[in-house]
Each structure stands twice: as structure tokens, then as C-alpha cells.
């Protein structure tokens, strides 16, 4: 077998490749992936440990800066008094030294106003007056001020309590960059972001990429689970690791309850793994190619038999059983090939059987013509069971001493003709057995019509009695001249076909009865209408017959001719609603009486409208008094607006009306009636219909 990708068409080849992949490739890749994930996990854990240490270190550094701020304010407070008005010396001593820390310093006296004593101090940012507990405490205090659209401003205050001096407070606005270490003297570690939240959880300070918003709204995932000091969060589609520290400085400061959050982007933490991550797919690909190459080296023998079996299986899937496989390998593959050929032969027989059975089923279920059902069944039975004679026999309806027989003998596959044969009581009881599913009969046993059919040869028959309408009056017979014995599967299939044939015959008989009932109902309705007046007796039946003849001359489809005949029987049903005094009036009708007569097509349509089976003849009932030139009634239709069947019926109706006796005149002679019809050509009647009508009259003359 050639090297390359073609070997992968073999299942065995794919099995070897799969074996290598499962035993070598997947474990190695899994080890690499697990190692990679372990390294990543260790880096993440180290990141969280580092953040935990850094946030503590940062908190201590922040605490030191707060102590320095307090000491500076204490120094300023010792040099001034609450009554002092000139702070020139204060500017000289502290102005430049504290500019990095304090943009401005103010003086606050109890129940008084705030004054600026150093730098640029915005006294309006402080809510006045300050609370009593704040200015009476020896501890320094911190005050924050936020304004929409501006950064939070931080104010640091120290209360000066000296004997003999009215207590006052020195308050300074602290430079945020200095306080939080995000300016020239940074406290933050590299690639670390800062966020600060007050006691209520409101963000009061954040660096460029630090978390914002309310602290309670952060989508925190604790790492490790259960820890209160480190977590991770998402921002702008990027993951951050964060450490947290709560500042509780109440031993030295008043009400300082801040939450410090230091965070680092996971991308920065994992930067050392980027190179390995980028080369990892190439390592996996090279390793996979190596596995495939090794697999090909081991797949050398046994693939050709498998390929043959595979192609043969595909042929069987396409129902092609003509090519058996030929394997000569002197091993299990050869045994498998022989078994495969045996299986294919059995499948071939089974598919042929299913095909024949399907054709028989379709013939039985798709046709309600009994002769067609019987003919198709006998043809398929001869083919399927390879028998010489196939017979369908039925006890004659006229006499139990005769049977009606359809026969197929030899290779003749034309439709069988029915013949009648005499039969004795013993032969009848043997053939039409009500107790057995199968009857075995030989021409040597019974001297019946079977001997004549078999031309006095010895034929062994298997009989399949059929039950129709709960009467065992029919039988299927399959004859062979050899001693072949049908197996159980063949007998079951034969019984199934016989049952299907019985169903088809029963359905055909039922439909025939329904058609007879429908036809009788229509004829009864027509005679009911005609019986209303002695002058119209038989009129509907004559119009129906003549309409059908004209339709056939015009080569109308058989279905339209059928509806034409039915419509002719019922075309005057609306006259049920017309008084007999009008129908049998010997003199000319008045305008009012004629108007009532003209209403009978509408009445007829309303009578038949609720009956679904008569929907196709409603146009005939409505339109048979419409005229080709549009002067007819009830709708004044003209030309091809009028149904072709109604145009035919109009001619037949007028013809029968004028040649029949009426209370006000005698029937016309044929020549006079014929001229009347011809005179209406193109006005009253369709010219094409007139031509067909004249052909019918000429043939009957």
C-alpha cells in the first residue's frame, strides 16, 4: 500500500493511528497541557501572594505618610495662635518645604470661620461648623470632599490643645499624589493599579486602570476561595488580580475607615508565558506528524482485503449484489470474505422479495379495480414464488356449483380472462377451507378445474383461502410440477399477500357499492323532479344521456363527462320549488310566473350546495339556462364565462324540451327542432357544441 493519506481510508489503518494517538500523543499532549496549566496556576498563586504582601506594605507606607502629615501640621500649629493675623513667618518657614504635601493650610476656631494661613486653601470645601467630637479630640482627622466631574479632595486636620489657649484646628488640603504615592514619589509597585473606597463603599480614588464604582458592585471572585485578602475581577474585557487591605487607624487617627485595593492585569503577570504559549501549537503539530509517520510505518499488511470489503459493502448499500469479493490471504480475512459473500447472496434474495412484495402491496392499495388487483397479484406471485401456475378462484354468485377462475400459466404475463368451471361439493369444501391458513392440493387428489388448467399434468398446489365479508368464497392457488417445499418464511409471505388481496377486493367491492348507491340516489332525485309533472317525465335522464354523448364527441376528459352526466340528472332539481300550477300551465306564462321559472337554477344550486360530493356539478345546475351571447339567466354570463359542461347541457336541454310534449303544445318533429338549434348557433348556443350535437343526431338518425 502506498504511503500518504490514502491509507486513512482503511478502518484498520485508522485504528492503528488511533492506538498511537491514544497511547503516545494524547498522554504526552495531556502532560504538556497539565504542566502548562500548573505553571500558570503557580504564577497566579504567586501573584496573589505578592499582592497580599504588597497591599500590606503599601498600607504601612501610607500610614507613615499620614504620620508625617500629622507631624507637619503639629509643627505649624505650635508656631501660631488662634488670634494671629499675620502669617508671614509661617510662609517663610513652611511655604516651600510643605508645597509638595499641602497646596494650602487653613485655621479653624471653634464656632468661628475658616481662614487660609498658608498657600491656596479653599475654605468653602469644609462643612462648617466642624462636629464637636471632631475638634475636641487629640487625634487628627481626615475630611474628603467630592464634586461632580472632579477628583476627590483630601483634607487633613490636627487639633491644637494648649493650656491657656482656646482650642483650634489646623486643616490642610493634602496633595493626593503625595498621600497615595501615585506621583513623583510613588509607593505603588510597577504595573500595579490603586483604588480606595470609604466606609460606605464609595470610590474616592482610583488610578488609571483600577476598579471604579461602588465596592459592593465589584464582580469579585475570591482567590483562593474563602480568602478575604485577594480576589480577581473583570474590567474592559481584561482580567485583573487584586489584593485588599482595610485601614483601621483609630488608635492614632479619627474615623479613618478606608479600603485599599491594589490590582495587576493578568496579562502582565502571564507575560513570561507568552512565548511558550505561542510555540505550543507548533510543538503539538510536529508531535502529531511524528505519530502519523510512525503509524504509516506499521500499517503494511491486511489493508487491501479490508478495502475490498469496504467497497463491496458500499455496493450492497446501493443494492448492487453482482460483484462478490475475492480474498486469497489464507487467514481470517479470507474467511470473512467468504462469509460476506454468503450474507450478500441472502440479502440479494431478501431485497428481491421485498421489491416484489412492495409492488404487490402498491397494486392492491392503489387500485380499486378488482380485475387489475387480481391480475397484478397473480403476476407478482408467479415471479416471487417462481411457480408455474397462479390461480385465483371464486365461487360464482349465480351458482355454488361453479367457480369463476382467473389463471396465469407459463410465461404469459397478459391480463387473465375469467372462465367458469363446474365444481363438486367435496372439491368446494376442500378448496375453500375455513379452518386452515394453507391447503396442500395435488391434481392427483382432486379432479377439478385444476386438471384442465394443468393440462392433465401432475401439479402440486398450495392454496391460500381468502375471507371477504366474513365469507370464505375465494382462494389463491400456486402450482409447481416439482417437489419443492415452501419454508415458513415463504408461507408467511404468501399468507400476507393473500390477506392484502382480500383487503383490496373488499375495498373494491365497497367502492362499487358506494358508487351504485350514489348513482341510484342521483337518479332517484332526478325522477323525483320529473315526477312532479307528467309532461317532464324522463326529461332529466334523456338530457343526461345526450349531454354525455356530446361530451364524448368533443373529447372531454372522462372525469368531466362523468360530472356532465350526473349534472344532467340534477339540472332541474330547483323546479321542486316551483308551483305545479306554473309547470303544467297550458297557456302562456305571465311575467311574474316566468320570473319564478327563471329562479329554478338558483334554487337548485342552493339545494345541492351543502352536499360536498355535488360541488363539481353546481356550475351546471346554475348555468344551464345561460346563453352564449349573454342574454340568458340567472347571471347573464356569456361565451367562455359559461362552464363548457353547462354549454353542452343547454343544447341537450332545449332539444329534449322541444321534441317532448308540453301542456301548451305538442312535441316538435326532429327536423324543426334541429333547425331551432342551428338558428341559435352563436347566440343561444356555443358553435362548437352545436357541431358536436349535430354529429350525435346524425349518428342516431
Image (tube, rainbow, N blue to C red):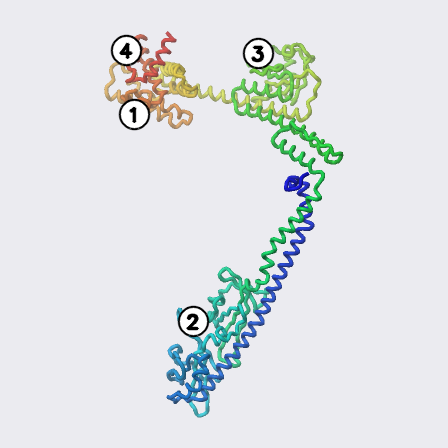
**Residue 36 screen position, x and y as percent:** 63, 59
Instruction: Decide which of tag 3 and tag 1 comes sooner along the chain.
Output: 3
Q: Of discs 2 and 1, which sits in the foreground?
A: 2
Instruction: Decide which of tag 2 and tag 3 comes sooner along the chain.
Output: 2
Instruction: Give me the disc on residue 419.
Output: 3
**Residue 472 screen position, x and y as percent:** 60, 20
Structural crowding at the residue carrying mark 3, measured as other residues with C-alpha within 10 Å and reported as few (<14), some (14–19) or many (≥20) = few
Residue 313: name its quadrant.
top right
Instruction: Decide which of tag 4 and tag 1 comes sooner along the chain.
Output: 1
Structural crowding at the residue carrying mark 2, measured as other residues with C-alpha within 10 Å and reported as few (<14), some (14–19) or many (≥20) = few
- Give the labeled residue for mark 2: 151
**Residue 497 screen position, x and y as percent:** 60, 24
Structural crowding at the residue carrying mark 1, measured as other residues with C-alpha within 10 Å and reported as few (<14), some (14–19) or many (≥20) = some
At numbered mark 4, what does the secondary structure look like: helix, strand or loop? loop
Residue drawn at the location 70% of the way across and 21% of the way down: 485
**Residue 523 screen position, x and y as percent:** 41, 18
- Give the labeled residue for mark 1: 635
Amino acid at each position: 500500500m502506498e504511503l500518504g493519506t490514502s491509507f486513512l481510508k482503511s478502518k484498520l489503518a485508522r485504528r492503528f493511528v488511533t492506538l498511537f494517538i491514544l497511547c503516545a500523543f494524547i498522554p504526552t499532549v495531556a502532560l504538556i497541557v497539565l504542566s502548562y496549566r500548573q505553571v500558570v496556576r503557580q504564577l497566579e498563586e504567586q501573584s496573589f501572594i505578592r499582592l497580599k504582601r504588597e497591599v500590606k506594605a503599601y498600607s504601612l507606607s501610607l500610614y507613615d505618610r499620614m504620620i508625617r502629615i500629622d507631624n507637619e501640621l503639629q509643627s505649624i500649629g505650635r508656631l501660631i495662635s488662634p488670634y494671629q493675623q499675620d502669617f508671614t513667618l509661617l510662609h517663610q518657614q513652611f511655604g516651600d518645604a510643605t508645597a509638595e504635601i499641602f497646596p494650602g493650610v487653613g485655621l479653624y476656631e471653634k464656632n468661628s470661620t475658616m481662614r487660609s494661613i498658608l498657600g491656596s486653601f479653599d475654605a468653602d470645601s469644609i462643612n462648617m461648623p466642624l462636629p464637636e467630637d471632631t475638634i475636641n479630640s487629640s487625634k487628627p482627622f481626615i475630611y474628603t470632599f467630592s464634586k461632580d466631574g472632579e477628583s476627590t479632595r483630601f483634607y487633613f486636620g490636627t487639633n491644637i490643645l494648649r493650656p491657656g489657649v482656646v482650642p483650634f484646628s489646623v486643616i490642610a488640603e493634602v496633595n493626593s499624589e503625595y498621600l497615595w504615592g501615585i506621583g513623583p514619589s510613588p509607593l505603588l509597585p510597577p504595573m500595579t493599579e490603586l483604588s480606595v473606597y470609604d466606609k460606605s463603599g464609595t470610590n474616592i480614588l482610583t488610578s488609571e486602570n483600577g476598579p471604579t464604582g461602588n465596592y459592593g458592585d465589584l464582580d469579585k471572585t475570591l482567590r483562593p476561595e474563602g480568602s478575604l485578602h485577594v480576589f480577581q475581577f473583570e474590567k474592559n474585557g481584561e482580567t485583573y488580580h487584586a489584593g485588599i487591605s482595610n485601614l483601621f487607624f483609630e488608635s492614632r487617627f479619627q474615623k479613618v475607615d478606608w479600603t485599599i485595593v491594589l490590582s495587576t492585569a493578568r496579562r502582565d503577570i502571564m507575560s513570561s508565558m507568552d512565548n511558550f504559549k505561542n510555540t505550543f501549537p507548533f510543538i503539538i503539530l510536529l508531535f502529531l506528524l511524528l505519530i502519523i509517520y510512525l503509524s504509516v510505518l506499521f500499517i503494511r499488511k491486511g489493508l487491501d482485503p479490508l478495502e475490498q470489503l469496504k467497497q463491496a459493502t458500499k455496493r450492497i448499500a446501493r443494492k448492487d449484489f453482482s460483484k462478490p469479493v475475492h480474498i486469497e490471504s489464507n487467514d481470517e480475512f479470507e474467511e470473512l470474505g467468504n462469509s460476506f459473500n454468503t450474507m450478500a447472496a441472502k440479502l440479494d434474495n431478501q431485497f428481491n422479495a421485498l421489491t416484489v412484495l412492495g409492488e404487490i402491496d402498491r397494486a392492491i392499495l392503489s387500485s380499486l379495480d378488482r380485475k387489475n388487483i387480481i391480475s397484478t397479484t397473480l403476476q407478482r406471485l408467479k415471479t416471487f414464488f417462481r411457480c408455474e401456475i397462479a390461480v385465483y378462484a371464486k365461487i360464482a354468485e349465480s351458482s355454488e356449483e361453479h367457480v369463476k377462475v382467473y389463471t396465469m400459466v407459463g410465461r404469459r404475463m397478459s391480463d387473465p380472462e375469467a372462465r367458469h368451471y363446474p365444481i363438486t361439493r367435496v372439491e368446494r369444501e376442500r378448496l375453500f377451507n375455513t379452518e386452515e391458513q394453507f391447503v396442500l392440493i395435488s391434481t392427483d387428489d382432486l379432479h377439478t378445474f385444476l386438471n384442465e388448467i394443468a393440462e392433465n399434468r401432475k401439479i402440486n398446489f398450495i392454496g391460500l383461502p381468502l375471507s371477504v365479508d366474513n365469507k370464505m368464497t375465494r382462494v389463491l392457488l400456486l402450482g409447481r410440477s416439482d417437489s419443492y417445499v415452501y419454508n415458513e418464511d415463504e408461507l408467511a409471505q404468501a399468507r400476507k399477500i393473500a390477506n392484502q388481496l382480500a383487503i383490496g377486493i373488499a375495498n373494491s367491492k365497497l367502492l362499487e357499492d358506494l358508487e351504485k348507491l350514489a348513482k341510484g340516489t342521483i337518479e332517484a332525485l332526478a325522477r323525483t323532479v320529473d315526477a312532479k309533472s307528467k309532461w317532464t317525465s324522463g326529461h332529466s335522464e334523456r338530457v343526461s344521456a345526450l349531454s354525455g354523448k356530446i361530451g364524448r364527441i368533443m373529447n372531454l376528459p372522462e372525469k368531466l363527462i362523468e360530472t356532465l352526466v350526473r349534472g344532467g340528472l340534477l339540472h332541474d332539481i330547483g323546479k321542486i320549488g316551483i308551483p305545479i300550477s306554473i309547470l303544467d300551465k297550458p297557456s302562456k306564462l305571465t311575467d311574474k310566473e316566468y320570473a319564478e321559472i327563471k329562479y329554478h337554477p338558483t334554487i337548485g344550486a342552493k339545494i345541492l350546495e351543502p352536499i360536498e360530493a355535488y360541488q363539481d356539478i353546481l356550475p351546471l345546475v346554475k348555468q344551464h339556462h345561460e346563453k352564449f351571447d349573454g342574454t340568458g339567466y340567472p347571471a347573464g354570463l356569456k361565451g367562455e364565462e359559461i362552464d363548457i359542461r353547462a354549454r353542452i347541457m343547454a343544447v341537450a336541454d332545449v332539444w329534449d324540451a322541444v321534441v317532448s310534449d308540453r301542456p301548451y303544445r305538442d312535441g316538435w318533429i326532429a327536423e324543426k327542432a334541429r333547425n331551432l338549434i342551428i338558428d341559435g348557433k352563436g347566440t343561444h348556443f356555443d358553435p362548437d357544441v352545436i357541431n358536436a350535437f349535430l354529429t350525435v343526431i346524425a349518428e342516431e338518425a
